[in-house]
């Protein structure tokens, strides 16, 4: 029986622990450790693989994903943590100048979310074209900023207290009104 004893590293959502086990397969290890496995979870190596001494078993649980884009909410479950893959799974794409937010913060499309997250919420801010008339010159700009003031700041324009801006800088960069 001593030859069946193995030391395995079990990583669940990025949290690793070392286990001594007599389990023969990955699935047997998960059963013995009382680690449930859902259909959409990612498991490496697969459940039917034989365990080898000093092997690492990695489980990334599928979690709820919500993506708000184009005036609709897309909800699904996925083990993926990379925004560009999540958008593909939701049949969504970013256009030039679009950006994504999570928890109110900018998030890069190629920056994975932490494995230990219990859920992921993403908002896509679509880029908007708008015009700025400054005395005799008209500028055509594109931005995915939340407010007009933020869009102008990102485009390199400085706003001063004496400036007259219509609509005001705090107005949302509405996809219809600006």
Image: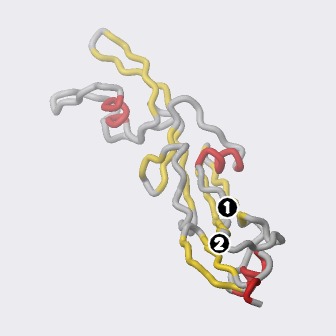
Numbered badge on residue 126: none
In primary-sequence order, the first of circles 2 and 1 is 2
- Residue at left 56%, top 60%? 120
- Percent from the top left, x then y, of residue 72? 64, 50
Q: Residue furthest bottom?
A: 1
Numbered badge on residue 79: 1
- Looking at the rendered structure, the secondary structure element under dot 1 is loop
- The quadrant in which residue 35 appears is bottom right
- Looking at the rendered structure, the secondary structure element under dot 2 is loop
Q: Give the number of the mark in front: 2 or 1.
A: 2
- The quadrant in which residue 77 appears is bottom right
- Percent from the top left, x then y, of residue 52? 73, 72
Classed neighbour count for the residue bearing mark 2: other residues with Cα under 10 Å, few (<14), some (14–19), many (≥20):
few
Classed neighbour count for the residue bearing mark 1: other residues with Cα under 10 Å, few (<14), some (14–19), many (≥20):
some
| Residue toward you, 149 or 155 | 155
| Residue toward you, 76 or 27 | 27
Q: Residue furthest front?
A: 3
Q: Which residue is mark 2?
A: 54
- The quadrant in which residue 66 appears is bottom right
Which image quadrant: the C terminus?
top left
- Residue at left 56%, top 63%? 115
Which image quadrant: the N terminus?
bottom right
Judged left or right of residue 153, residue 174 is right
Q: Residue furthest top?
A: 136
Task: Tell me, yes or no, whether the two marked residues, 2 and 1, touch with CB atoms within 8 Å.
Answer: no
Judged left or right of residue 134, residue 13 is right
- Residue at left 59%, top 37%? 94
Colour pattern of the rendering: secondary structure
- Percent from the top left, x then y, of residue 12? 61, 72
Judged left or right of residue 20, residue 30 is right
Up the image or down, 138 lies above or below 70; here it is: above
Q: What whole-number distance in Å separates the C-alpha atoms at marks 2 and 1?
A: 25 Å
């Amino acid at each position: 029986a001593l030859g069946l004893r193995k030391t395995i590293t079990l990583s669940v959502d990025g949290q690793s622990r070392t286990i001594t086990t007599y389990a023969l397969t990955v699935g047997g290890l998960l059963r013995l450790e009382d680690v449930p496995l859902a259909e959409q979870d990612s498991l490496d190596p697969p459940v039917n693989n034989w365990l080898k001494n000093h092997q690492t078993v990695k489980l990334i649980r599928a979690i709820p994903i919500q993506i708000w884009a184009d005036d609709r909410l897309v909800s699904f479950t996925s083990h993926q943590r990379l925004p560009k893959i999540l958008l593909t799974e939701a049949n969504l794409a970013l256009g030039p100048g679009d950006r994504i937010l999570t928890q109110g913060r900018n998030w890069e499309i190629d920056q994975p979310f932490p494995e230990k997250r219990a859920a992921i919420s993403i908002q896509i801010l679509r880029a908007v074209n708008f015009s700025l008339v400054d005395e005799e010159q008209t500028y055509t700009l594109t931005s995915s900023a939340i407010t007009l003031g933020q869009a102008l700041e990102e485009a390199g324009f400085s706003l001063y207290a004496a400036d007259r801006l219509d609509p005001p800088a705090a107005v949302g960069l509405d996809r219809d009104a600006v």
